[in-house]
Image: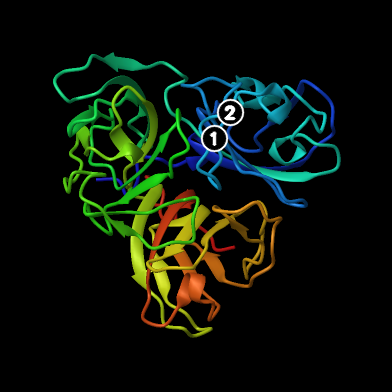
Amino acid sequence: MAYTTIDDPSAHFQAKIYTGNGTNSTSYTFDGNSDLQPDLLWFKSRSASGHHQVIDSTRGVNTWLGSNDNSAQGTNPSEGYLASLNSDGWTSADGSSGTHPNRNNNQNTVTYVAWGWKANGGTRTTNTESGNNPAGGYQANTTAGFSVVDYTGTGGAGTMAHGLGAVPDTIWVKNIDQSDNWAIYTSAKGNTHYGIFNTYGNWEDDDTVWNDTSPTSTVFTVGTSHLTNADGEKYLAYCFTNIQGYQKHGKYTGNGNADGPFVYTGFKPAYLWVKYDGNGENWRLYDNKRSTFNEMDDTLVIQDTNAEATNNDLDFLSNGFKLRSTDSNSNGSGATIYYYAVAEHPFVSSEGVPCTAR
């Protein structure tokens, strides 16, 4: 069996850095595989404070969510929506500062990063409500283990199809109708707890979020919580499953030492977030375009609006990442830290060609 089924991860995920020009209808293209039409685009300003913007092809290009707050989805054009998702990138619709410049994705002279994932080009498979099982749909990229799921809650514990054909390892859910917190599932923590993108808090123990039930290869379970399944309210879920040589979600134990632990992923990362299993610590974000050499020193935080900071936290290696800081966010002594990583290149290609280090 080949080591990986994805020799070119840039066909499914890429990071892009750019400088806004303040001009309406400006198109931006990814630098790698030109076939990446993003179905999930996540933007963050780097040189100025500003909200994260999460846009997907299921909801459409004029709606967004923010990972750093619990707001319902926004639809105000002055808050930085897009004109289109393109075969190799996107077109920004509003280049002005608008009424909310901290929600813009193309403000003049401001530097940005965008992360893009490919699902199924916006083409959904739909299902109808059955008992407490919500009605909705999904668009899935089974090769890369990523799907976008939308559904309407029932208020009673039920299941929702995700379309991956494999068990999801992490699920990010947001009520798009109400000001509810994000609910983050990770198989590394289990079905009794959920994390919250928009806070510094602990992973919470709540049996009404996932109904204390792990996802299967066909469905994930939602309980009675307003975070995941309020009656008649609309939800969005991003689902990811581990793919050898391409994508991995897991956990590691910090040692509180500048010579920190090595975490094997099976690929050279292009993207990484980490979150300590405790209170008061950041969701840290790294990628291969903002930091092009080791040590990785350009950091963004999922749960706030701050501009990019400098922290010499870790190295991206040919087969994983290594912690290089005593910072408790990513390497607290004895701490459990969860992570999600996507590949720039598999450690070994399907033809047995090894990946080079940075």
- Depicted 47 relative to depicted 42: above or below: below
Q: Position of residue 79 (x, y in %)?
A: 69, 30
Q: Nearer the viewer, residue 316 or 22?
A: 22
| Displayed quadrant of residue 146 | top left
x, y (%) of residue 85? 60, 22
| Residue ID at (42%, 23%) | 120
Q: Which residue is mark 2?
A: 74
Nearest to the observer: residue 311 or residue 260? 311
Q: CA distance from mark 1 to mark 2?
A: 6 Å
Q: Are marks 1 and 2 in contact (CB under 8 Å)?
A: yes
Element marked by disc 2: loop
What mark, if any, has residue 101 been given in the picture? none
Q: Quadrant of the C terminus?
A: bottom right
Q: Which of the image's four quarters has the N terminus?
A: top left
Q: Position of residue 331 (x, y in %)?
A: 47, 75
Which residue is the site of mark 1?
65
- Residue 258 shown left or right of residue 186 in the figure: right
The residue positioned 73% from the left and 22% from the top of the image is: 93
The amino acid marked with disc number 1 is: Leu
In the image, what residue occupies the spot 62% across and 70% down? 295
Q: Residues within 10 Å of mark 1 (few under 14, many from 20)?
A: many
Dot 2, crowdedness within 10 Å: few (<14), some or many (≥20)?
A: some
Q: Earlier in the sequence, mark 1 or mark 2?
A: 1
Picture quadrant where residue 152 is located: top left
Residue 184's spot in the image, x, y percent?
37, 48
Q: Is residue 316 left or right of residue 222?
A: right
Q: Residue placed at 25% from the left, 52% from the top?
A: 206
Q: Nearer the viewer, residue 233 or 260?
A: 233
SS for callout 1: loop
Q: What is the basis of the colouring in this image? A: rainbow
